[in-house]
Amino acid sequence: MPDSDESLASSVPNSPTGLLGQYDSDVTVLTFGEKTIILVGTAHVSQESVELVKLVIEQEHPDGVCVELDAKRFEAISHPNRWESLDLKDIIRQKQLSTLMVNLVLASFQKRLGDKLGVMPGTEMLEAIRMAEKHNAPVTLGDRDVRVTMRRAWRNTPFWRKSMLLSSLLLSIFDTTEVSEDEIRNLKKKDVLSEMMKELGKEVPTLKEVLIDERDLYLAKKMVEAPGTRTVAVVGAGHVEGICKTIENQETEEVNLEKLNYIPPVSPMWKMVGWSIPLLIVGSIAWIGWQKGADAAGENALFWILANGIPSGLGGLLAMAHPLTVLTAFVSAPFTSLTPVIGVGYVTAFVQAYLQPPLVRDFQAVAEDIAIPGRWWKSRLLRVFLAFLLPTIGSIIGTWVGGTRIVSNLF
């Protein structure tokens, strides 16, 4: 790390010195001691940004390239057919089905956006990596692991906001609003994702802090630490201001990557809430048996089984799942409802994936199928998601109906 008197960072827009040519306002040059960072702000869906990245690297011959990607996102955009090799049953075992569903929704959104604009989001990042390889320059993946970002965002979001975010996500799956030509032109000029995050940040400030501000710090730190003294860094335009501020104010020395990668544990209160419901139900049935006899306890236990099993089984039927999946939903829901360790949806999804495993063509077409409601029941892959969601909803309904009835019987 340079000494403090040599670390004076400066920003020189448009007309840098040395080999740097004349660029537009999307290129900013930062100096940090002996290190020069040529910062290229892009719109993730713009062919012009792709060409700019190619021009800058071709002209500047950097000894390193840093891109706004982490390993997972790099894999996602460089291997668009990676879904075909997924072990769905293993994903279900690891309780990552909801994460996969979110990723598929984002992939579908990106495909539709790419089809409209003629450029898939992230193409400029791939171009930067391709040009780096051409010039034998090492590549630094400068962004934080997307899984860490999403988990930190989720843990920092108030409970009532989480339901709103989930609702918005579900509604966005089937959003078929046509994009006008003017909107397309504007999208090509902006960092669309960052613009969306800024708007979301106005409603939920904690999300902006995690999704934008923290990543600005993370990216700035990785750029300064990237190998070489002359680095081209490619990021979404929405991150440029925060990165420049961090480097200019020499705040990178204070950035703790370990702290930014820390995922807050689940609050003990939520663990208590998770176990309080089954304890309340089992305790209530036991108390009823002690006060009113074994027959009364048996009636309440039977009501609990039917209140959970019937709506969960109906969920399986609505999903048009395999008959054994439906039976599994009915049998397992009364028991999974009594433990926060595993939900009925993971059990039914695993059974459905085992009995009717998705075909290769289901993975190949999922980005298109997920946006069309009718295809959810025709795709084996999406039917696994239905077999996860609908019995889960049925179990939630059953838990409240059965729990309310049993607790009321105490009095």
Image (cartoon, rainbow, N blue to C red):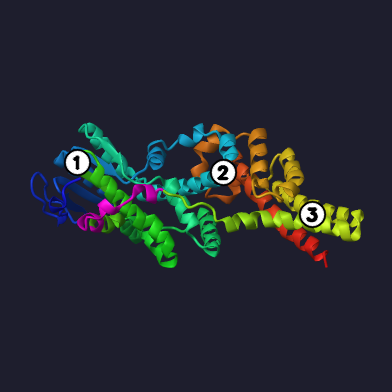
In the picture shown, does residue 169 fall above or below 341? Answer: below
Give me the C-alpha separation between circle 3 and circle 1: 65 Å
Identity of the residue drawn at 58% across and 51% down: 373
Give me the C-alpha separation between circle 3 and circle 2: 27 Å
Q: Which range of residues does the magenta coloring cover?
A: 245-261
Judging by the rendered image, the residue that carries numbered circle 2 is 97
Residue 238 lies in what quarter of the image? bottom left
Judging by the rendered image, the residue that carries numbered circle 3 is 304
The answer to whether the residues at label 3 and label 2 have Cβ atoms under 8 Å apart is no
* Amino acid type shown at disc 3: Trp
* Residue 253 included in the magenta stretch of the image: yes
Residue 325 locus on image (x, y percent): 71, 40
* Residue 148 included in the magenta stretch of the image: no
Q: Secondary structure at mark 1?
A: helix
In the picture shown, does residue 139 fall above or below 155? Answer: above
Please give left or right for residue 84 compared with residue 242 in the image: right
Mark 3 surroundings: few (<14), some (14-19) or many (≥20) residues within 10 A: many
Please give left or right for residue 168 compared with residue 258 in the image: right
Which badge, 3 or 1, is on the more N-terminal residue? 1
Q: Nearer the viewer, residue 290 or 310?
A: 290
* Amino acid type shown at disc 1: Ile
Label 3 or label 1, whichever lies nearer to me, is 3
Which badge, 3 or 2, is on the more N-terminal residue? 2
Label 1 or label 2, whichever lies nearer to me, is 2
Majority secondary structure in the magenta region: helix
* Amino acid type shown at disc 2: Leu
Residue 87 lies in what quarter of the image? top right
Mark 2 surroundings: few (<14), some (14-19) or many (≥20) residues within 10 A: many
Disc number placed over residue 57 in the picture, else none: 1
Identity of the residue drawn at 49% across and 55% down: 154
